[in-house]
Image: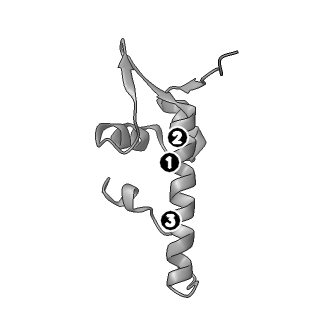
Amino acid sequence: MPVKSTTVDIEGAAQLMNIHARTAEKMIARGILPAARIGRAYVLMERDVLAYIEEQITSQTAQKRENGARQTRGRAAVADGMEALR
C-alpha cells in the first residue's frame, strides 16, 4: 500500500516553523525550502518542512555544544538559512 504524502501551503509551512508566512515565501524564493507552484499557490511537502526544522535543530544544537553551550541574549540564535533572508 503506498504511503500517503501530506502537503502544506505557505501558511501551513509557516505554522509548522512558527514563522510569518512572508518569511516562508522568502525561503521558497531563495531555494531554502523546496516547493512547487501549482496554479497560483505554492505546495510544499510536509516532510520537507519537518526535515528543514530537524536539520536546523541538529545544526544549532551542535553549534551550541561547540561554543561551550553559551547562553544567547534575547531571542534564540537565527539559523544560517534564516540569516540570508535579512
Q: What is the distance, in whole Å, between disc 2 and disc 3 at their CAs?
A: 15 Å
**CA distance for labels 3 and 1:** 10 Å
Q: Position of residue 11 (x, y in %)?
A: 52, 31
Residue at left offset 57%, top offset 36%: 47
**How dense is the environment of label 1, judged by Cα within 10 Å: few (below 14), some, or many (20 and up)?**
some
Q: Residues within 10 Å of mark 3 (few under 14, many from 20)?
A: some
Q: Identify the secondary structure beneath mark 2.
A: helix
Residue type indicated by callout 3: Ser
Front-lying residue, 74 or 3 = 3
Where residue 81 sits, quadrant-wise, is: bottom left
Q: Secondary structure at mark 1?
A: helix
Q: Amino acid at mark 2?
A: Val
Residue closer to the observer: 16 or 20: 16
Instruction: Check the image and name the residue furthest to the top.
Output: 39
Residue 41 in the image, given as x and y percentages of width and height: 40, 19
Q: Residue furthest front?
A: 1
What residue appears at the point 40 percent right and 39 percent down from the top-left corner? 22
Q: Are marks 3 and 1 in contact (CB under 8 Å)?
A: no
Looking at the image, which residue is at 37% across and 43% down? 27
Q: Secondary structure at mark 3?
A: helix
For residue 30, say whether it is visible: yes
Position of 10 compared to 37: left or right? right
Q: Is residue 26 above or below residue 76?
A: above
Amino acid type assigned to the residue bearing label 1 in the image: Tyr
- Residue at label 1? 52
Earlier in the chain: of badge 3 and badge 1, it is: 1
Q: Which mark is residue 59?
A: 3
Q: Mark 2 or mark 3: name the one nearer the start of the chain.
A: 2
Give left or right: position of 1 versus 34.
Answer: right
Q: For the residues labelled 2 and 1, say whether their Cβ atoms are less than 8 Å apart.
A: yes
Is 32 on the left-hand or right-hand side of 78? Answer: left
What label sits on residue 49 in the rendered view?
2
